[in-house]
Image (spheres, coloured by chain):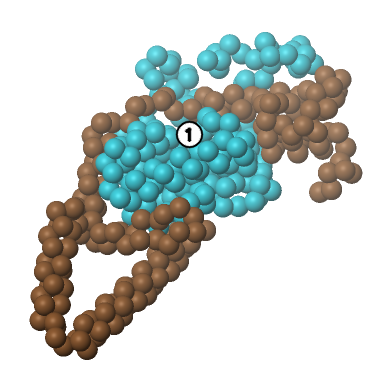
């Protein structure tokens, strides 16, 4: 219905249907209907009916209840269980920054893995001393490895963004 | 409820983004903070929608589990945690209500939520009638009314939660009110002021018993 062609009574009906009788929730333009309600008995009747319905709805309000401590514990236990799993987790950095892949491994796990990798690299380097091509190959391999790692990060990023879009949008 | 000005929303969004980064990194304290802040809202929404404390707890737990899983994909400045959680919980509630209707189960199979014991029988009956009428509304109309009337969200906020336009939300609210006006006409007619008071446009002329 075209609101500009509505009679005052129709406008009032529209406002009460859409916003209820609480005048603080009415759009600014509808405030002028207050005078109309005061002047027209039929409008006042309509208004009081809407107000009675609102009061009735208030009657249906449930008593507030504190959420149980058990429930909070259960929710936090879900959180802990999820993070104890050693699945990779993408932590978004600030906007525009590239995401980094972290894992849920502990710092100690990382340290020992890094130490092992360092030993491995030093071993290869020492084994390769005197054979110049080997060290060059090693540098190339590491570069390739880094590139594959980046691609993996991009793929993971895209997949997770897409699932987020599906969930949120 | 926080004021919904753009500046406050941006601040809230930044705060939420930081919390979600911490949660994605496994920070228990951040998770606890989010649970303590948002659990009451979710419980309230689910209790209104489902009329059952037990089911509301399940919905709340499921919603948070989804949040934990989504933390790693949280896109900064895209949503507030409260909006996101309400949206997820709303969808879960609607699914349950639809499931109930297709399997012809009653409103709930556990103890229904009782009004406070101080209320007298008449008020209990009235509360029961209102809840019954709300249960009969289509799910999305009930959700719109719950968000706006019982959770105090503005129409703009509720429309974001429901992922619909404000006009669509207004339409749901109007249909819900019209439906309730018909199904509860015996009840609201009793709340009308006397004929003498009809012409008076005051606050004092409604029956005392419904005032809080």
**Chain holding disc 1:** B
Q: Quadrant of residue A64?
A: top left
Q: Which chain is cyan?
A: B
Residue at 26 percent across and 79 percent down: it is: A139
Identify whether B209 is placed above or below B77. above
Compare residues B41 and B207 and report the one nearer the observer: B41
Label 1 secondary element: helix
Res B70 visible: no
> In the rendering, what colour is chain A?
brown
Residue at 16 percent across and 57 percent down: it is: A111
Residue B19, x across and y down, in percent: 39, 43
Question: B176 left or right of A71?
Answer: right
Provide the residue designation for mark 1: B131
Residue A77, x across and y down, in percent: 22, 44
Residue at 45 percent across and 59 percent down: it is: A97
Q: Quadrant of residue A68?
A: top left
Identify whether B161 is placed above or below B111. below
């Amino acid at each position: 219905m075209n609101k500009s062609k509505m009679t005052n009574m129709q406008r009032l009906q529209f406002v009460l249907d859409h916003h209820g009788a609480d005048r603080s929730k009415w759009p600014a333009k509808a405030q002028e209907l207050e005078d109309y309600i005061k002047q027209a008995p039929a409008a006042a009747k309509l208004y009081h009916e809407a107000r009675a319905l609102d009061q009735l709805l208030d009657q249906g309000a449930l008593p507030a209840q504190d959420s149980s401590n058990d429930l909070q514990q259960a929710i936090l236990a879900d959180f802990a269980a999820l993070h104890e799993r050693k699945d990779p987790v993408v932590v978004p950095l600030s906007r525009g920054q590239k995401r980094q892949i972290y894992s849920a491994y502990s710092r100690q796990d990382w340290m020992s893995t890094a130490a092992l990798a360092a030993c491995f690299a030093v071993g290869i380097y020492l084994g390769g001393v005197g054979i110049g091509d080997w060290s060059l190959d090693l540098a190339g391999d590491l570069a390739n490895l880094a590139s594959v790692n980046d691609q993996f990060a991009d793929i993971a990023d895209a997949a997770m963004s897409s699932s987020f879009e599906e969930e949120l949008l | 409820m926080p004021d919904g000005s753009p500046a406050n929303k941006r601040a809230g969004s930044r705060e939420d983004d930081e919390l979600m980064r911490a949660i994605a990194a496994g920070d228990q304290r951040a998770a606890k903070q989010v649970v303590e802040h948002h659990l009451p809202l979710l419980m309230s929404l689910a209790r209104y929608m489902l009329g059952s404390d037990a089911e509301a707890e399940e919905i709340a737990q499921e919603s948070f589990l989804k949040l934990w899983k989504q933390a790693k994909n949280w896109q900064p400045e895209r949503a507030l945690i409260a909006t996101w959680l309400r949206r997820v919980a709303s969808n879960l509630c609607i699914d349950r209500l639809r499931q109930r209707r297709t399997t012809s189960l009653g409103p709930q199979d556990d103890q229904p939520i009782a009004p406070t014991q101080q209320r007298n029988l008449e008020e209990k009956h009235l509360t029961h009638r209102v809840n019954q009428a709300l249960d009969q509304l289509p799910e999305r109309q009930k959700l719109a009314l719950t968000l706006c009337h019982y959770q105090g969200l503005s129409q703009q906020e509720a429309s974001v939660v429901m992922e619909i336009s404000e006009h669509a939300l207004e339409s749901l609210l109007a249909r819900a009110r019209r439906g309730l006006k018909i199904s509860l006409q015996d009840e609201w007619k009793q709340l009308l002021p006397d004929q003498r008071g009809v012409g008076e446009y005051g606050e004092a002329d409604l029956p005392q018993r419904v005032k809080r």
